[in-house]
Structure formats: structure tokens, C-alpha cells
Image: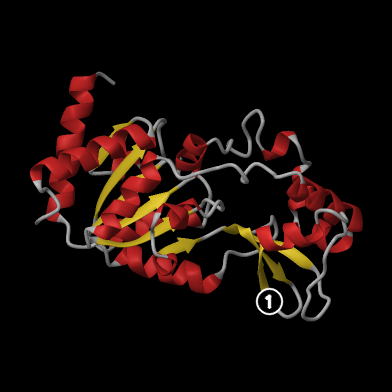
């Protein structure tokens, strides 16, 4: 896309944002990759270091060896430890500061929206959050950095300090359902917004990919910002082909310059 074409698209995006009273943002892996987190299926991603079968809930529960490999990965720092929010995350957080953002619905598990400044209660994490561990028995949650600091030197695989139960990364493994309350609240928000902005998602992973359908069903406009085609492009009111950070930076600069957040 040429600079002129991108500028035209950004102007259209700003007009849609100005007309919207309630905005919901939906983010996928294309936002996280710009913070150095590889897509799970890309070279260097998680599946190049682990057997995907080790991320089934059945294997996790039945195999001490699988749990040991996962803790070794966490002790070594994983692919999330050095990641920091990028321009797209900061732009989305700025939207919240301006008062139009209802919530962020994300497929990502890296906690970067919260680190960028979005209120945790406004971030619906459909696939969980890798920065936390959860006991499968009593549901107590532990910050991952705290647990790593306590157990890294010994290399011991920790259990729940409250009840002794199994600790699991607080993310959705294969074979697990999405958290029903989070999914319901996210779906309700999408159904009642004026504008849904999809950023960095190919919209192929269900049920998360139903979110744009809920928004369109509720009468909202749909904007898609993604490097590649998605299955919802034909239904979208605006499609911008480009990187999340570049496009969102352009949109925010235009909004600041023109006061375009004021409907």
C-alpha cells in the first residue's frame, strides 16, 4: 500500500471513530508479533520448541514429564519475558484515556495491553494470561514472576502453596473451553458497540472469531487492520492492509491533530 493510499484509509478510519460513541477493539497475534513474540506457528514460535500435544489439557494432567518441560521453559524465560508493549498497544491504551473505548477483547496471552495502560477490568482475555499460574484444585492464582523467583534456583516444580494442587499456566490449553463468563461479557460488549476495530487477527480461531459477527449483528461498523486477508473482509466497512503499530500510530496522530475523537 502506498503512503497516499494509507493516508486515505487513515482518514476514513478517523471519520468512523469520530462517529462512534462506543468502541471495542479486538486484537490477535499480529499485535503481539510486533513486540517480538513469534506467532505460535511461525519459525521460532512455541511449536518449534514444543510438541503441541504437550499443550493439551489431557497431557498436562496425565504427564509429569510434560509439566516438567513446561516449567523448564518458564524458568528459562520463555518467549514472553522480554516482551514490551509496542505502538499498537500504546495507541489502544490512549483510546481508553480519551473515554471512547469500552473494552479490549484479545486472543493474546502476554499481558501487554495491561502493561501499556489499559485497565485490567477492560481487557477480556479469551485465551488467558501467561503471566499468571492457577491451581486446578482451589483456583488460587499466583503471579508467574513471583513463583519463578521462589523456585528458579532449586528448579523444583511448585505446587499450590495453599492446597498443594497442580499449578498450570492460566491460559487455555487444547481441549479446554474458553472462560464462559469472559466470553459472554466480550460478546455482549461487541453486540452493543458502535464500532469494532479488529487489529492483527486473521479471524480463523473460533469461538473468538465470532466476535465480529456479534458486532455486525448489533448494527456496529467493522474496521479490520491486518497484514493479510481475513474471512470477514467482505463484511467489513473498512479494511486497512498494514502493520498494527504503523496504522494505529497514524490514526492516533490524525486524531490528536484534528480532535477527531469528538463525535
Secondary structure type for disc 1: loop
Asked if one can make out residue 23 in the rendered structure from this viewpoint, the answer is no
x and y percentages locating residue 177 in the rendered image: 62, 65
Q: Indicate the position of residue 56 as horizontal and vertical percent values.
A: 75, 55
Q: Quadrant of the N terminus?
A: top left
Coloring basis for residues: secondary structure
Query: What residue is rendered at 49% in x and 56% in y?
Result: 208
| For residue 260, above or below residue 187 | above
Indicate the position of residue 162 as horizontal and vertical percent values: 77, 80
Res. 262 visible in picture: yes
Q: Nearer the viewer, residue 184 or 120?
A: 120
Q: Residue at x 16, y 39 (%)?
A: 254
Q: Quadrant of residue 47?
A: top right
**What residue is rendered at 12% in x and 48% in y?**
260
Q: Quadrant of the C terminus?
A: bottom left
- Residue 79: horizontal and vertical position, in percent? 65, 41
> Residue 211 sits in which quadrant?
bottom left
Quadrant in the rendering for residue 99 = bottom left
Q: Residue at x 77, y 62 (%)?
A: 150
The number of callouts visible is 1
173 up-or-down from 90: above or below: below
Q: Is residue 183 left or right of residue 69?
A: left
> Furthest-top residue in view?
2
Q: Residues within 10 Å of mark 1 (few under 14, many from 20)?
A: some
Placement of 63 over or under 198, stated as above or below: below
Label 1: which residue?
A: 140
Amino acid at each position: 500500500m502506498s503512503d497516499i493510499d494509507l493516508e486515505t484509509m487513515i482518514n476514513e478510519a478517523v471519520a468512523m471513530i469520530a462517529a462512534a460513541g462506543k468502541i471495542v477493539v479486538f486484537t490477535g497475534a499480529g499485535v503481539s508479533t510486533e513486540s517480538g513474540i513469534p506467532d505460535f506457528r511461525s519459525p521460532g514460535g512455541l511449536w518449534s520448541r514444543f510438541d503441541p500435544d504437550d499443550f493439551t489439557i489431557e497431557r498436562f494432567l496425565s504427564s509429569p514429564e510434560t509439566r516438567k518441560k513446561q516449567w523448564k521453559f518458564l524458568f528459562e524465560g520463555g518467549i514472553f519475558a522480554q516482551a514490551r508493549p509496542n505502538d499498537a498497544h500504546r495507541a489502544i491504551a490512549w483510546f481508553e484515556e480519551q473515554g471512547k473505548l469500552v473494552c479490549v477483547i484479545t486472543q493474546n496471552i502476554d499481558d501487554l495491553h495491561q502493561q501499556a495502560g489499559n485497565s485490567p477490568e477492560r481487557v477480556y482475555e479469551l485465551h488467558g494470561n501467561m503471566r499468571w499460574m492457577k491451581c486446578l484444585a482451589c483456583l488460587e492464582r499466583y503471579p508467574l514472576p513471583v513463583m519463578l523467583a521462589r523456585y528458579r534456583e532449586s528448579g523444583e516444580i511448585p505446587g499450590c502453596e495453599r492446597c498443594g494442587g497442580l499449578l498450570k499456566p492460566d491460559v487455555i490449553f487444547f481441549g479446554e473451553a474458553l472462560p464462559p463468563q469472559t466470553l459472554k461479557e466480550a460478546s455482549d460488549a461487541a453486540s452493543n458497540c458502535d464500532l469494532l476495530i479488529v487489529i492483527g487477527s486473521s479471524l480463523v480461531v473460533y469461538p473468538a472469531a465470532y466476535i465480529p459477527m456479534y458486532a455486525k449483528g448489533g448494527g456496529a461498523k467493522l474496521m479490520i487492520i491486518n497484514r493479510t486477508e481475513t474471512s470477514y473482509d467482505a463484511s467489513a466497512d473498512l479494511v486497512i492492509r498494514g502493520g498494527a503499530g504503523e496504522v494505529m500510530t497514524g490514526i492516533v496522530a490524525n486524531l490528536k491533530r484534528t480532535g477527531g475523537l469528538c463525535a
